[in-house]
Structure formats: structure tokens, C-alpha cells
Image (spheres, rainbow, N blue to C red):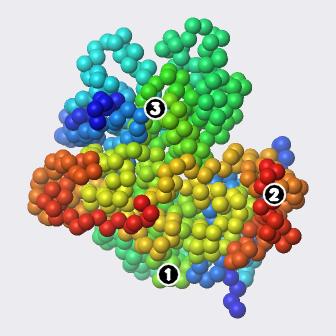
Amino acid sequence: MAPPVLKVDNLTVEFPGRRGTLRAVDDISFRIDAGEVLGVVGESGAGKSMTGTAVIGLLEPPGRIADGRVELEGQRIDNLPHEKMRRLRGDRIGMIFQDPLTSLNPLYTVGFHLTETIRTHTDRTEAQARKRAIELLSEVGIPAPEQRIDQYPHHFSGGMRQRVVIALALCAEPRLVIADEPTTALDVSIQAQIIQLLKRLCRDHGTSVMLITHDMGVIAETADRVAVMYAGRIVEVGPVREVVQNAKHPYTEGLMGAIPKIGGRTEDLVQIRGTMPRLSQIPSGCAFHPRCPKAFDRCRRERPDLIQVGQSRAACWLHAPEHAGTGASGDGHG
Amino acid sequence: MAERPLLQVRDLAKTFDVSPPLLNRLLQGQPQAFVQAIDDVGFDIPRGTTFSLVGESGSGKSTVARVVVGLYRPTRGSVTFDGTDLASIRSRRQMAPLRRRWAMIFQDPYASLNPRWRVRTIIAEPIRVHGLSSGESETRKRVGELLELVGLSAADGEKFPHEFSGGQRQRISIARALASEPDFLVCDEPTSALDVSVQAQILNLMKRLQRELGLTYLFISHDLAVVYHISDYVGVMYLGRLVEWAPARELFTRPQHPYTRMLLEAIPDLEMSGRARTPVGGEVPSPIDPPSGCHFHPRCPFADGDRCQREVPATLDIDGGGQVRCHAVAEGRMPPADVHTRGA
């Protein structure tokens, strides 16, 4: 069997500082298969963007991968030298960031961005690269690409810029695209357009996607599987339908309940009490226990690993075999 | 509706001059340019209810909020607060007793609190400005009460804003807004900078405060789900015009205007019913040079190619107590709304 497109094992990202080392990503493992869209969801500070950044080797010093390994199609990439990693980005891994304005250089035309990237990663001539760039622009739905190619980023609207960024990410037909909040800066009507585009392109090209977002709605529509992150760890991972409709971890449950829904009753929303802990004050045991309505003794002492529950896996002691069925008895203690 | 609405907005318009500098105009012959940020907007907010304005970037919803609280002077039209036409007020002295009765909550809880002031000073400012307390100890007591009202502790008053998370800062903003004992709050995207679990806390807090204090809200948001959750009435804005408003349930179950329908179609489907999201075609045109007639006609699947292009639609009353501005609705050309009967 072919190796997964991306395989991450026990990845740990640390930031050494004067007042001790902060652990932004703590021992996480996941895989993305060919053509699969993995959604990574969580609130600010959960470590989801940091995970993406670590995978593509763009951690800002002093941040570093302290442990674990990252494999792209069976090849280890977390220890590659700088230059090799630089060539790999854009070639086999494409990237889409939140703000399309900062990922394009305002001094260069859109066409220059595209042809430069195409020529860096393939052996096309200038003319061939330009032809390919026009094809790409039309593929991502930019009208009149022959004219638009010679315009500058500021001539484009937010949605159109994000289309250009997607075209850039797809220049070299990468195996994996890492999209970090690709629709967050866009209006809701444009957001729907971009999501559809991303889905269509990945289906057509068989590209795998790691979709990092805080927006459960985007995940529900786009992802095949979801990993929910909290305080640097994956607390639940499973097929999107399972996670959205039948959450196993109390955090996921709270998160889903907190989202306002149209058509539902308009009583108070489910509240998760408290806030996400700071990296310097991650609680012992399960990091979620101080906010968890179902926490019991073991949650404070021991850190749970991912436990298989139905089709999902959840890092929660409620699902440990010895607690199964009696989990609810912990309720009264909180 | 025997009772007089707390806020009445009539034919409100605001134009901004965005012309190039005079010298460029003279030397290079560049024309003057204006943005019609809001154009002929009218609605009422009954006392104790929430009226929400939704729309995409550039729709003018924040400008309405700013005109209503008096941060901008309207180019045309009137804002009547509890029976007093705000344009009729000539002096600061006349304005002061009214001014105390409304307050604003802003989107960014990082930018809206002075980082050099202690929280108790921030919250006490409206109390001092409006002379609402007889002395320092009374002010302190009141600040403590306000902090507890929004779910913080009185001791938090000694801290500085940077010691709080985004959600807690938004609570401080709310406490400050409530310090002058207002009955009307204008909330401009109060939760859009917050994580979803924190947003839920703030929305619940706002609803509780409304119940307990009888507050009236003008709520600005781009998030339709949030708006559904908090509103009694919803208005939809597009390029400066209020294209439709109706009681919330009515608007979400029987949207009339094609733009409202498109917005509702574009909402992500969390129930995963398999409903494909129909993206709205095209993009919002530039407000400097909006399309003629009905601004929405270039993107509208129901545009008839003539009247919609030429004529600005008039305001039409609709069943269920709302209003809509659309030729297709007026001429009965719209098919019945095909709304996902998602439990609504």
C-alpha cells in the first residue's frame, strides 16, 4: 500500500524562552491519505497553525521541532536542510494563507508571481510558463485571464486575490496543500465561492489538503476527516460527520453547542466556562479538565491518549474501557 | 404597536467626499468623487428589542451605527430617539441628558480600551463624564457592581486591559457601556473578533442583560447565524441600501429579496444535510460607482434587464410586518422562497 501523503508522528513544537520552554504543539500524530481533506479545527492558541507551520518547515526561531517526525509520501522531511525544504515547498506542498494581500508582493504583477513559481519548479520556458499561468488563472475562475495576468495585486478584490493565491499554490501540481484559514478574511458569499473552488480543484487533481480553520461550518462542508485541537493536542479525530454530529470529547461537544445555528431555538447557547489556558499554564492531566463539566479525579492526574470510540478517537478518560458506561458518574463531582 | 419605538430612522443618507486633493483636481483635472455610504435607510426599533443589520463589507451597516450614535452627521434624513429628533438639538447642554442614554460596543476589544488606564478608571469614565455619582467611594462601588454584572469580579478593576483575554476585554467594554445606565446599546460586530466558545459567552451575557435591564440593541454583524440567535428584527443591507427588513423569524423562513435569499443560501451547512451551498455569483461592486437602478441587478438571477437597471425599487410592505425593495417582488415575479425547512 502506498504510504500516506502526509504522516506526522509525535510532533512536538517548543519555544524556548527566558522563563522556561513553552510547548505550542504537544506530541500529536495524524495522517492524510491521497486525495483526502483533513480539517484541523480549534480556537486561538490551540496550536493548529503552529502544526501547519511546523509541517512545512517555516517555524520562526526560536520555535523548533523538539520531537517527532514528519513524512511526505514516505520520505522524512522534518530534518531536511533549508535549501531542500525550500524547493519542496511550492513543489510538493502548496500553501494558502489567510490574508491574500500579504502573500502576494504588491510590487510584482500577478503574472510574475505565477511564472516565477512555475519556472522555479518546472523546466518550462518563459513563454510556456506564461501560457500555463493563464490556464491556471482561468481554472481558478478569474475572468479575462489574458488581461488580468499583467495587473498588480491591488487591482484584484479580496476574493479574486485569494483565487490567485490558490493558483499559485497549485502551480507545480503539489501532492499536498496546506490551507491556513483560507476563507477567514472573506465575506460569506465569497467564502462559499472559494470553498467550492478549493474542493473542485482538489478533486480534479487528486491533491490532499490540510485545512486549518476555526470555522466548523467550513470544515463540515469541505473536510473528509477532522482533528480537533485544544491546548496543543489533538483531543478528537474522526470522520467529519461523526465529529460534527456525534462528538465524543466534551470539548468538541461544547464547541459544537456554542455555534449559533439558524433554525434552532434561540435560547442561550451552550457555554464552555473559562478560557483556553495560556501556554505557560497548561493544567495537569487532561488540559481541558478545569473547564470540563464531566471531569473526575483521573482527569486531573493523568493525561489521556486518543482512545478509539466508534469511528472516532478521543483523548478523554470517559471513554477508557474501565470507565465506559460509568463515565456519567463523574458528573456530580465537578 | 401602540408604544412609540425607542429609535426611528427615516430616509437616512450619508455621503462621504473621497475626492483627490484639490491640487490634483486642478492640475490633473481629476473629478470630485463621493461615496454614498448609506442611502435612504429607514427602520424602527421598538423598546426592549434587538434590531440587527447584516450585510457584506461595504454595505454601510457600520455607517448606520455611527450616524445613529452621532459620530457622523447625516447628509439627509432623521434619527429620532425616544421622540426627540436628534437634528433639532443645537447645543451640547441639550444633548447631554440624551447622550447618557445610549452607548456603543466596538468590534475590537484590544483597540477600544485605553492600555494605560486601569479597568476601574475605564469603567468610571462615563460615570464621571455624566456626573452620575456623588463621590469617589460611590463611583468605586458602582464600578464593582458593573464588573460583577458582566461576570468579572470587583477586584479586576485594579488590573490593566492587557491582563485580560479577548472575551474578558469585551466584558469590560460592555461594563463601560452600561456605566451611564443607558437604555440603548449600539453593538458593532461585538463578537466577530472572538473565538466561538467565547462568542457564546458574550452573546448569552448580552441576552441576559437585555432581559434584566430592558435594553434595546442595534446589532451590527456579518454573521447570519449570530443574528438569527440574538435578533427580534433583521435588516439586510446592500451597497448602502436597506433592501429588506422583517421580524427575524419571518426573514429567515420567508426571505423576499433575492439578495437575502442568496445570503441565506451561502451559509455553511452544519447539519450536513448534503445541501450544496449555492455561492452568490460575482462580488460586491465598488460603492464609489454602484450599479444603476437596483444596486443588486448585475448579480440578481431575477433581474428583468430593464426596469431593475433603470429604476431604484420603492419600499414595499410585506406580509408579516417587514419591508422590501425589489421590483421582482413588487411585480410578483419572485418564486416562493425555497427555504430549507431546517426546523425553523
The tag on residue A330 is 2
Q: Between residue A290 and residue B156, name the one nearer to us.
A: A290
**What amino acid type should be assigned to the residue bearing mark 3?**
Leu
Mark positioned earlier in the residue sequence (1 or 2): 1
Q: CA distance from mark 1 to mark 2?
A: 45 Å
Chain at numbered mark 2: A
| Residue B241 in view here | yes
Q: Between residue A109 and residue A175, name the one nearer to us.
A: A175
**Picture quarter containing residue B144?**
top right
**Picture quarter containing residue A50?**
bottom right
- Pointer 1: what residue? A203
Q: State left or right for residue A19 relative to residue B12.
A: right
Q: State left or right for residue A76 relative to residue B111.
A: right
Residue A173 at x, y = what percent?
53, 79
How crowded pointer 2 is (Cα within 10 Å; few <14, some 14-19, many 20+) is rated as some
**Between tags 1 and 2, which lies in front?**
2
